[in-house]
Image (cartoon, helix red, strand yellow):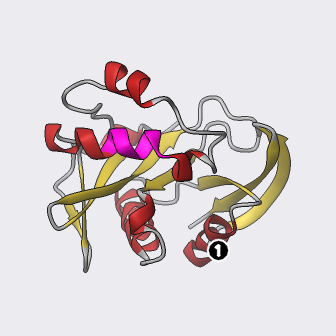
Amino acid sequence: MIDLAKGAWPPAPIETDRLVLRAPEARDRSALVELFASPEVGAHLGGPRPRAEIERSMPGVPERRPGRFVVALGSATIGQVTLTRAVEHPSPAAVGKLDLGYLFLPHAWGHGYAAEACAAALAWRAAVLPGEPVVLTTRTANVRSMRLAARLGFTEVERFEAYGAEQWLGILLE
């Protein structure tokens, strides 16, 4: 199994036309608390977590780990993109592969930021771990996420039930 942290972590910030992907910093904490407590975001993840619980558990500097990028638009944190090794997953087809995840604050939806940030994270992965397959899981009811997966080049592997809803698993093999 290839180590995700093969390159230096964190890498230099990744800049796109509009965004910066970088390691989390203390200034991101409030936006990340808002992200994880958001009812709109939580609707696609089985429900939001209680804000008080997130406030208690999140350190002053949010966790920095290989593959976790905060997404900033100017000076504002608008979301995060993660590439993590799927050690445990409801689908055996995903176990051991890199798993792309993304969450954005609702005010950032509909502007193409998720596509731009995910494409940048996937390009970083291609440079650090060339040829490593990536999986993406989303609820089939999350139409926007299904469209984004297709736009990024993921192809369906399977559909399965988990977390009380039908899930879609796609793979990117480039």
Q: Which residue is mark 1?
A: 147
> Could you say where residue 147 lies in the image, as x and y percent from the top left?
65, 74
Could you say which is closer to the camera, residue 3 or residue 38? 38
- Given residues 140 and 109, the one toward you in this image is 109
53 to 84, vertically: above or below: above
Task: Note whether 139 is above or below 155 in the view shown.
Answer: above
Q: Secondary structure at mark 1?
A: helix
Say if residue 166 shows up in the picture: yes
Which is more toward the observer, 162 or 141?
A: 141
Q: Is residue 118 left or right of residue 88?
A: left
Q: Amino acid at mark 1?
A: Arg
Asked whether the viewer can see residue 67, the reply is: no
Q: Determine whether, in the image, residue 20 is placed left or right of residue 130.
A: left
How far from the left and from the top, in percent, is residue 17?
A: 25, 80
Residue 35 on the magenta segment: yes
Label 1 neighbour load within 10 Å: few <14, some 14-19, many 20+? few
Expressed as whole percent of the image width and height from the top left, the position of residue 73 reads 24, 67
Report the magenta stretch's main SS: helix
Per the image, is 144 magenta? Answer: no
In the rendered structure, which segment of residues is drawn in magenta? Answer: 32-38
Give the residue at x 43% y 57%. 104
Residue drawn 36% across the image and 20% down it: 57
Residue drawn at 30 percent across, 51 percent down: 70
- Residue 88: image x %, image y %? 65, 29
Tally of numbered tags: 1
Hey, which quadrant is residue 120 in on the image?
bottom left
Residue at image x 57%, y 45%? 42
- Give the quarter of the figure containing the C terminus: bottom right
